[in-house]
Amino acid sequence: GNSVTQMEGPVTLSEEAFLTINCTYTATGYPSLFWYVQYPGEGLQLLLKATKADDKGSNKGFEATYRKETTSFHLEKGSVQVSDSAVYFCALSITGGGADGLTFGKGTHLIIQP
Amino acid sequence: NAGVTQTPKFRVLKTGQSMTLLCAQDMNHEYMYWYRQDPGMGLRLIHYSVGEGTTAKGEVPDGYNVSRLKKQNFLLGLESAAPSQTSVYFCASRLLSMNTEAFFGQGTRLTVV
């Protein structure tokens, strides 16, 4: 089956630190990959996505590259801010693989200290 | 510009009571989903729908029922609430294509006492 594995945290960093949140996946087909962000008290919102190998998704200073050879989609940001404190979810979907939506990781709680 | 709207946002139920959570989307999406989110468990799929009049079970369907009588609405029902159903519930929708992202509602925080 399909699965997504990510570090659960909490991950605590100081402001302006470099961020990496690891995400690896297992898929029976050729997935699209997503990062979602959930701010306190809110629903999930798409942060970035990549639909084919070697694609780089980017948004708000965050980046992630679709690495088929290592089945990974690690999230990075060069200099984090307090406002980046949130829960981050890695997710995949399989083209033609059924209609039960996305497969999510369990989420990584990120805490940025001033 | 509403996107996905969930009602209510908060609710407290007594054990054994029933309720219905409403999800409405205005993006003409085919797929709709209900998830629950619990600490340390991530998101778990309860039920989903691929179109008007169709529903299917997800990972944790027991104790819940759903209906999709209109394309824009997806209802989640609890017939006899239990404390184990205390959770935050999220509705999501997406287009037919698997390369598109899901859009989420703001969530419903349900407490069963």
Image (cartoon, rainbow, N blue to C red):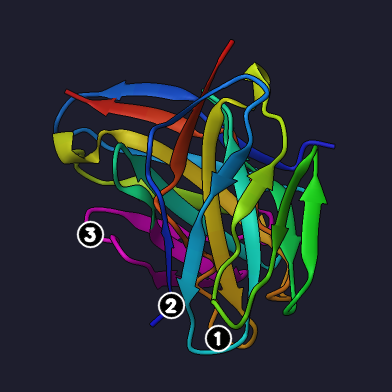
Q: Which residues are magenta?
A: B45-73
Reply above or below: A73 against B13: below
At horizontal 48% and vertical 88% (from top left) the residue drawn is A28
Secondary element at image label 2: loop
Q: Quadrant of residue B50?
A: bottom right
Along the line of sight, the residue nearer the viewer: A73 or A19: A19
Q: Position of residue A100 (x, y in %)?
A: 49, 72
Q: Report the quarter where the C terminus of chain B lies.
A: top left
Nearer to the camera, B104 or A50: A50
**Residue A77 magenta-drawn?**
no
Residue B62 lies in the magenta stretch:
yes
Chain that bears disc 3: B
Dot 1 amino acid type:
Gly
Asked if both marks, 2 and 3, belong to the same chain, the answer given is no
Which residue in the protein does label 2 denote? A2
Badge 1: few (under 14), some or many (20 or more) residues near its Cα, within 10 Å? some
- The mark closer to the camera, 1 or 3, is 1
User: Which subunit holds the residue at mark 2?
Assistant: A
Label 2 Cα neighbours within 10 Å, binned few <14 / some 14-19 / many ≥20? some
Are the residues at dot 1 and dot 2 in contact (C-beta closer than 8 Å)? yes
- The single residue placed furthest to the right in the displayed view is B1
Determine the residue positioned at 49% across, 50% down.
B75
